[in-house]
Image: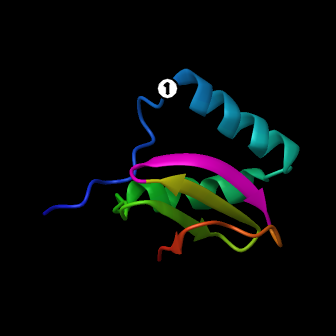
Amino acid sequence: MRLPKIQFANLPRPVWQHLLQRVDERRISVADLLALQEWVKTGPVAPAGDWYKDFGSFVLCGTDQFPKTVLEKGMKPFGAAIP
């Protein structure tokens, strides 16, 4: 069984709005967003269920192939850590 890649294109509008709101609230810097962009370009694979990717200054959390929210450093993520 082939695992799906984490999907950033064609996310439902409410998901995009939530992610953008969290980026703004959490004061994620442009440098941090560039790190996220570079990671996305690698085509990361989505594990089944809840997951998170720690970028050091923020954490991206998701479920299956969809990103769901952004946490500030120090906030407790849910799911399995992915490299």
Which residue is pictured at 77% across the width and 35% down the height? 21
- In this image, 3 relative to 71: left or right? left
Residue type at the position of mark 1: Pro
> Is residue 31 shown to the viewer in this render?
no
- In this image, 40 relative to 14: left or right? left
Residue 52, horizontal then vertical, whole percent? 56, 65
Which residue is pictured at 68% across the width and 67% down the height? 77
Which residue is pictured at 75% across the width and 70% down the height? 76
Most frequent secondary structure within the magenta stretch = strand
Which residue is pictured at 86% across the width and 49% down the height? 27
- The answer to whether residue 77 is above or below residue 70 is below
- The answer to whether residue 63 is above or below residue 48 is above
Quadrant of res 57 = bottom right
- Quarter of the image for the N terminus: give it: bottom left
Q: In terms of secondary structure, where does tag 1 sit? A: loop
Residue 80, horizontal then vertical, whole percent? 51, 73
Magenta residue span: 64-72
Q: Nearer the viewer, residue 13 or 31?
A: 13
Q: Nearer the viewer, residue 25 or 77?
A: 77
Packing grade of label 1 (10 A; few <14, some 14-19, many >=20) is: few
Q: Which residue is mark 1?
A: 12
Residue 42, horizontal then vertical, whole percent? 37, 62
Residue 69, horizontal then vertical, whole percent? 65, 48
Q: Residue furthest left?
A: 1
Residue 68 painted magenta = yes
Quadrant of res 8 = top left
- The answer to whether residue 60 is above or below residue 22 is below
> Is residue 18 shown to the viewer in this render?
yes
Q: How many numbered circles does the render carry?
A: 1
- In this image, 12 relative to 31: left or right? left
Residue 4 painted magenta = no
